[in-house]
Amino acid sequence: MMIADGGEVMKLIRRQVNLIKYINENPKAGIKEIAEVLDVSLQTIKSDLQNMHEFMQTYGVKIEILPGNQLRIQGFEHITYMLRATGMMMEFSLEKQTMLFVLMQDDFSTLQDMADALYVSKSLMEKVVAALLKKYPEELHSVRHYGIRSIGSQLEKRSRIC
């Protein structure tokens, strides 16, 4: 997900949004608890919080890591607004995001290109693309070592988006 941040673009992944949601619902939770619930390492939580620092500041939120892996949250009252802003951008399923990505490309897109653009693993993208190829066999064309692309004119591609 991309969020405008003072002219720059901040990219949040689902895990980071889930992290913010969990902190909002459990403000007294420590990093260890959050890591267990989200099924990631302590270092991942710390890195995500560090990477989102500037983004959260634009909403008046600051989360500090204290000794003992506890959190200090400043601007807690702004987290709900921040979540609302990020939630609006996460309404599309991964399948729809992938289809939009393919439709917007003029040439073939590899699994890795799509995975990188949508911030998911290549193995997850393989599953999503396999499902899309079954669902839209007439609209999508896959060529080994080249990738996948949408077949049709610009008008046909635009009508698929709607």
Image (cartoon, rainbow, N blue to C red):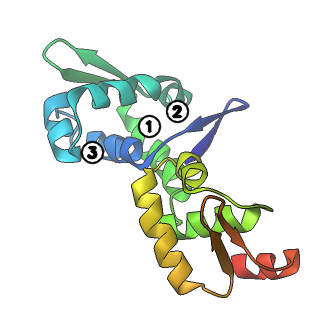
Q: Along the line of sight, which residue is nearer the eye, 139 or 5? A: 139
Q: Which of marks 2 and 3 is nearer the N terminus?
A: 3
Q: Do the residues labelled 1 and 2 touch (CB within 8 Å)?
A: yes
Q: Along the line of sight, which residue is nearer the eye, 38 or 128? A: 128
Disc ID at residue 22: 3
Q: Quadrant of residue 139?
A: bottom right
Q: Nearer the viewer, mark 1 or mark 3?
A: 3
Disc ID at residue 25: none
Q: Do the residues labelled 2 and 3 touch (CB within 8 Å)?
A: no
Q: Along the line of sight, which residue is nearer the eye, 155 or 8? A: 155
Q: Distance between the residues labelled 1 and 2?
A: 6 Å
Q: In which quarter of the image is residue 22?
A: top left
The amino acid at mark 1 is: His
For the point 21% across and 42% down, the residue is: 26
| Image x and y of residue 66, in percent | 22, 14
Looking at the image, is 130 positioned above or below residue 123?
Answer: below
Q: Is residue 75 left or right of residue 105?
A: left
The quadrant the C terminus occupies is: bottom right
- Residue tagged 2: 59
In the picture as drawn, the residue positioned furthest to the bottom comes out as: 138
- Residue tagged 1: 78
| Image x and y of residue 19, in percent | 32, 41
On the question of residue 126 being in view, the answer is yes
The amino acid at mark 2 is: Tyr
Q: What element carries label 2?
A: loop
For the point 36% across and 33% down, the residue is: 76
Q: In this view, does 44 lie to the left or right of 8?
A: left
For the point 17% across and 46% down, the residue is: 37
Q: Are marks 1 and 3 in contact (CB under 8 Å)?
A: no
For the point 58% across and 54% down, the residue is: 114
The amino acid at mark 3 is: Tyr
Q: Along the line of sight, which residue is nearer the eye, 149 or 79? A: 149
